[in-house]
Image (spheres, helix red, strand yellow):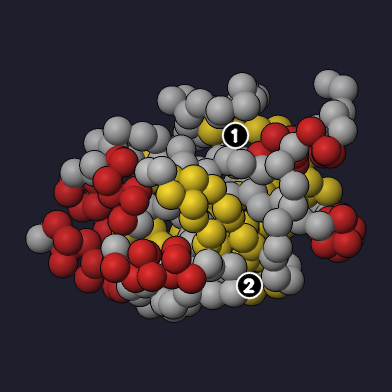
Amino acid sequence: MDRLSAAQFPPALGHGPVEEIFPNVFFVTGAMETVLQGMDWAFSRNMTVVRDGERLIIFNSVRLTDEALAGLDSLGRVTDVVRLGALHGRDDPFYVDRYQANYWALPEMIHESGLQATHTLAPDSLPLADAGLFVFETTKIPEAVVLLKREGGIAIACDALQNWLAPDQFFSDASSELMQQMGFFTPANIGPVWMQAAEPAAGDFVRLAEIPFSHALCGHGEPLRDSAQADYQATFSRLFGI
Protein backbone atom coordinates (compact mmCIF):
# COMPACT_ATOMS: atom_id res chain seq x y z
CA MET A 1 0.00 0.00 0.00
CA ASP A 2 1.50 3.34 -1.09
CA ARG A 3 1.72 6.09 1.50
CA LEU A 4 -0.18 9.32 0.96
CA SER A 5 0.94 12.84 1.78
CA ALA A 6 0.23 13.84 5.38
CA ALA A 7 -1.48 16.96 4.02
CA GLN A 8 -4.23 14.79 2.53
CA PHE A 9 -5.55 13.99 6.01
CA PRO A 10 -7.27 16.22 8.58
CA PRO A 11 -4.62 18.31 10.34
CA ALA A 12 -3.33 17.76 13.83
CA LEU A 13 -5.26 19.86 16.33
CA GLY A 14 -4.09 20.94 19.76
CA HIS A 15 -3.35 18.22 22.28
CA GLY A 16 -1.64 17.58 25.58
CA PRO A 17 1.27 15.27 26.40
CA VAL A 18 1.25 11.52 25.87
CA GLU A 19 1.30 10.15 29.42
CA GLU A 20 1.94 6.62 30.68
CA ILE A 21 -0.91 6.26 33.14
CA PHE A 22 -0.48 2.51 33.68
CA PRO A 23 2.56 0.42 32.79
CA ASN A 24 2.64 0.24 28.97
CA VAL A 25 -0.69 2.06 28.67
CA PHE A 26 -0.53 5.62 27.35
CA PHE A 27 -3.20 8.33 27.21
CA VAL A 28 -3.44 11.71 25.50
CA THR A 29 -6.19 14.34 25.40
CA GLY A 30 -6.63 16.49 22.30
CA ALA A 31 -9.05 18.79 20.55
CA MET A 32 -11.96 17.98 18.28
CA GLU A 33 -13.71 20.53 16.07
CA THR A 34 -16.80 19.52 14.14
CA VAL A 35 -20.30 20.49 13.08
CA LEU A 36 -23.15 18.55 14.68
CA GLN A 37 -26.85 19.26 14.38
CA GLY A 38 -26.03 22.44 12.44
CA MET A 39 -23.79 23.87 15.17
CA ASP A 40 -20.04 24.34 15.53
CA TRP A 41 -18.56 22.28 18.35
CA ALA A 42 -15.12 22.36 19.98
CA PHE A 43 -14.38 19.89 22.76
CA SER A 44 -11.84 17.30 23.85
CA ARG A 45 -11.31 13.65 22.99
CA ASN A 46 -8.83 11.02 24.10
CA MET A 47 -6.54 8.47 22.49
CA THR A 48 -5.30 5.37 24.29
CA VAL A 49 -2.17 3.52 23.17
CA VAL A 50 -1.34 0.06 24.52
CA ARG A 51 2.18 -1.34 24.22
CA ASP A 52 2.57 -5.08 23.68
CA GLY A 53 6.26 -5.88 23.46
CA GLU A 54 7.55 -3.62 20.69
CA ARG A 55 4.06 -3.14 19.21
CA LEU A 56 1.81 -0.14 19.80
CA ILE A 57 -1.96 -0.51 19.42
CA ILE A 58 -3.98 2.70 19.02
CA PHE A 59 -7.56 3.12 20.23
CA ASN A 60 -9.68 6.23 19.48
CA SER A 61 -7.00 7.84 17.36
CA VAL A 62 -6.03 11.50 17.78
CA ARG A 63 -3.52 12.84 15.27
CA LEU A 64 -0.40 14.13 17.03
CA THR A 65 1.97 16.90 15.99
CA ASP A 66 5.20 15.88 14.30
CA GLU A 67 7.12 16.41 17.55
CA ALA A 68 4.70 14.25 19.50
CA LEU A 69 4.75 11.59 16.76
CA ALA A 70 8.51 11.35 17.23
CA GLY A 71 7.86 10.71 20.91
CA LEU A 72 5.28 8.07 20.04
CA ASP A 73 7.77 6.37 17.73
CA SER A 74 10.26 6.19 20.60
CA LEU A 75 7.78 4.03 22.53
CA GLY A 76 7.53 1.29 19.91
CA ARG A 77 6.10 0.58 16.47
CA VAL A 78 2.46 1.29 15.66
CA THR A 79 1.10 -1.92 14.18
CA ASP A 80 -2.64 -1.68 14.76
CA VAL A 81 -5.38 0.95 14.85
CA VAL A 82 -8.69 0.03 16.49
CA ARG A 83 -11.99 1.82 15.91
CA LEU A 84 -14.41 1.21 18.77
CA GLY A 85 -17.20 3.66 17.97
CA ALA A 86 -19.15 4.80 14.93
CA LEU A 87 -18.90 8.48 15.92
CA HIS A 88 -15.09 8.50 16.05
CA GLY A 89 -12.44 7.71 13.43
CA ARG A 90 -11.39 11.13 12.07
CA ASP A 91 -7.69 10.36 12.36
CA ASP A 92 -7.72 6.62 11.69
CA PRO A 93 -6.72 7.01 8.00
CA PHE A 94 -3.68 9.11 8.96
CA TYR A 95 -2.30 6.45 11.31
CA VAL A 96 -3.16 3.52 9.06
CA ASP A 97 -1.36 5.23 6.17
CA ARG A 98 1.65 6.52 8.12
CA TYR A 99 2.42 3.17 9.73
CA GLN A 100 0.83 0.81 7.17
CA ALA A 101 -1.02 -0.51 10.19
CA ASN A 102 -3.70 -3.15 10.54
CA TYR A 103 -7.14 -1.56 10.89
CA TRP A 104 -9.68 -3.18 13.21
CA ALA A 105 -13.41 -2.43 13.32
CA LEU A 106 -16.76 -4.08 13.94
CA PRO A 107 -18.43 -5.61 10.86
CA GLU A 108 -21.07 -2.86 10.61
CA MET A 109 -18.58 0.01 10.88
CA ILE A 110 -18.33 2.30 7.84
CA HIS A 111 -15.63 4.96 7.60
CA GLU A 112 -16.69 8.14 5.83
CA SER A 113 -13.35 8.26 4.00
CA GLY A 114 -13.90 4.81 2.53
CA LEU A 115 -11.14 3.27 4.66
CA GLN A 116 -11.72 -0.48 4.88
CA ALA A 117 -10.97 -2.59 7.92
CA THR A 118 -8.30 -5.21 7.41
CA HIS A 119 -9.43 -7.15 10.49
CA THR A 120 -12.84 -7.66 12.08
CA LEU A 121 -13.17 -7.03 15.80
CA ALA A 122 -14.67 -10.03 17.57
CA PRO A 123 -14.26 -11.71 20.96
CA ASP A 124 -11.89 -14.22 19.38
CA SER A 125 -10.25 -11.70 17.04
CA LEU A 126 -8.33 -8.90 18.75
CA PRO A 127 -4.89 -7.31 18.32
CA LEU A 128 -4.03 -8.06 21.97
CA ALA A 129 -3.88 -11.51 23.54
CA ASP A 130 -4.59 -10.15 27.03
CA ALA A 131 -7.89 -8.46 26.16
CA GLY A 132 -11.56 -9.23 25.77
CA LEU A 133 -14.31 -7.54 23.78
CA PHE A 134 -17.78 -6.31 24.72
CA VAL A 135 -20.06 -5.48 21.79
CA PHE A 136 -23.31 -3.55 22.15
CA GLU A 137 -26.05 -5.65 20.58
CA THR A 138 -29.14 -3.41 20.73
CA THR A 139 -27.77 -0.14 19.37
CA LYS A 140 -28.52 1.53 16.04
CA ILE A 141 -24.82 2.29 15.51
CA PRO A 142 -21.90 -0.06 16.23
CA GLU A 143 -19.93 0.36 19.44
CA ALA A 144 -17.58 -1.83 21.45
CA VAL A 145 -15.49 -1.76 24.62
CA VAL A 146 -12.14 -3.52 24.91
CA LEU A 147 -11.39 -5.01 28.32
CA LEU A 148 -7.64 -5.07 28.87
CA LYS A 149 -6.67 -7.75 31.39
CA ARG A 150 -4.08 -5.65 33.20
CA GLU A 151 -4.01 -3.70 36.47
CA GLY A 152 -7.24 -5.32 37.67
CA GLY A 153 -9.02 -4.72 34.36
CA ILE A 154 -8.98 -1.61 32.16
CA ALA A 155 -12.05 -0.82 30.05
CA ILE A 156 -11.06 1.06 26.88
CA ALA A 157 -14.26 2.71 25.68
CA CYS A 158 -15.28 5.23 23.04
CA ASP A 159 -18.56 7.16 23.37
CA ALA A 160 -20.79 4.82 25.35
CA LEU A 161 -18.76 5.28 28.53
CA GLN A 162 -17.49 8.78 29.29
CA ASN A 163 -16.00 10.55 32.31
CA TRP A 164 -16.03 14.28 31.64
CA LEU A 165 -15.94 16.13 34.95
CA ALA A 166 -15.68 19.70 33.63
CA PRO A 167 -14.79 21.57 30.44
CA ASP A 168 -11.06 21.62 29.68
CA GLN A 169 -8.76 23.78 27.56
CA PHE A 170 -10.05 22.29 24.30
CA PHE A 171 -13.65 23.46 24.77
CA SER A 172 -15.12 26.57 23.21
CA ASP A 173 -17.31 28.68 25.47
CA ALA A 174 -20.39 27.85 23.41
CA SER A 175 -19.73 24.10 23.55
CA SER A 176 -19.05 24.27 27.29
CA GLU A 177 -22.38 25.97 27.94
CA LEU A 178 -24.39 23.71 25.67
CA MET A 179 -22.79 20.49 26.89
CA GLN A 180 -23.31 21.53 30.49
CA GLN A 181 -27.02 21.86 29.74
CA MET A 182 -27.03 18.46 28.01
CA GLY A 183 -25.53 16.69 31.02
CA PHE A 184 -22.12 15.81 29.59
CA PHE A 185 -20.16 16.81 32.71
CA THR A 186 -21.18 13.87 34.85
CA PRO A 187 -18.76 11.33 36.35
CA ALA A 188 -18.97 7.79 34.96
CA ASN A 189 -21.49 8.90 32.37
CA ILE A 190 -23.07 7.41 29.28
CA GLY A 191 -22.51 9.84 26.41
CA PRO A 192 -25.68 11.93 25.88
CA VAL A 193 -25.26 12.35 22.10
CA TRP A 194 -24.31 8.68 21.79
CA MET A 195 -27.49 7.75 23.70
CA GLN A 196 -29.56 9.75 21.22
CA ALA A 197 -27.87 8.23 18.18
CA ALA A 198 -27.51 4.66 19.44
CA GLU A 199 -30.74 4.22 21.43
CA PRO A 200 -29.32 1.36 23.52
CA ALA A 201 -31.58 -0.97 25.46
CA ALA A 202 -31.06 -1.84 29.11
CA GLY A 203 -30.00 -5.38 28.26
CA ASP A 204 -26.64 -4.24 26.94
CA PHE A 205 -25.83 -2.59 30.24
CA VAL A 206 -26.98 -5.62 32.22
CA ARG A 207 -24.33 -7.59 30.34
CA LEU A 208 -21.67 -4.91 30.69
CA ALA A 209 -22.27 -4.61 34.43
CA GLU A 210 -21.34 -8.27 34.84
CA ILE A 211 -17.81 -7.76 33.46
CA PRO A 212 -15.23 -6.91 36.13
CA PHE A 213 -12.90 -3.96 35.56
CA SER A 214 -11.22 -1.49 37.89
CA HIS A 215 -10.42 1.38 35.54
CA ALA A 216 -11.88 3.05 32.45
CA LEU A 217 -10.13 4.99 29.69
CA CYS A 218 -12.83 6.57 27.56
CA GLY A 219 -12.94 8.54 24.35
CA HIS A 220 -13.98 11.58 26.37
CA GLY A 221 -13.13 12.70 29.88
CA GLU A 222 -10.66 11.90 32.62
CA PRO A 223 -9.25 8.43 33.29
CA LEU A 224 -11.43 6.72 35.89
CA ARG A 225 -9.28 4.74 38.29
CA ASP A 226 -9.97 1.99 40.82
CA SER A 227 -13.77 2.35 41.16
CA ALA A 228 -14.86 2.23 37.51
CA GLN A 229 -17.10 -0.83 37.63
CA ALA A 230 -19.02 0.32 40.71
CA ASP A 231 -19.31 3.87 39.40
CA TYR A 232 -20.70 2.77 36.05
CA GLN A 233 -23.03 0.25 37.65
CA ALA A 234 -24.52 3.14 39.63
CA THR A 235 -25.02 5.06 36.38
CA PHE A 236 -26.63 2.07 34.67
CA SER A 237 -28.98 1.70 37.62
CA ARG A 238 -29.89 5.40 37.57
CA LEU A 239 -30.54 5.55 33.83
CA PHE A 240 -31.99 2.10 33.15
CA GLY A 241 -33.27 0.89 36.51
CA ILE A 242 -31.10 -2.22 36.46
Residue linked to disc 2: 22
Residue 31 falls in which quadrant of the image? Answer: bottom right
Report the residue at 34% width, 70% height from top: 180
Residue 233 picture location, percent across and down = 25, 66
Residue linked to disc 1: 104
Provide the secondary structure element on which disc 1 rests.
strand
Q: Is residue 92 left or right of residue 95?
A: left
Q: Residues within 10 Å of mark 1 (few under 14, many from 20)?
A: many
Provide the secondary structure element on which disc 2 rests.
strand
Report the residue at 69% width, 65% height from top: 15
Residue 171 picture location, percent across and down = 53, 68
Report the residue at 54% width, 75% height from top: 168
Q: CA distance from mark 2 to mark 1?
A: 23 Å
Q: Quadrant of the C terminus?
A: bottom left
| Disc nearer the start of the sequence (2/1) | 2
Viewer-nearest residue: 206 or 198: 198
- Foreground: disc 2 or disc 1: 1
Viewer-nearest residue: 147 or 204: 204
Identify whether 171 is placed above or below 110.
below
Q: Residues within 10 Å of mark 2 (few under 14, many from 20)?
A: few
As shown in the figure, which amino acid type bears the numbered disc 1? Trp
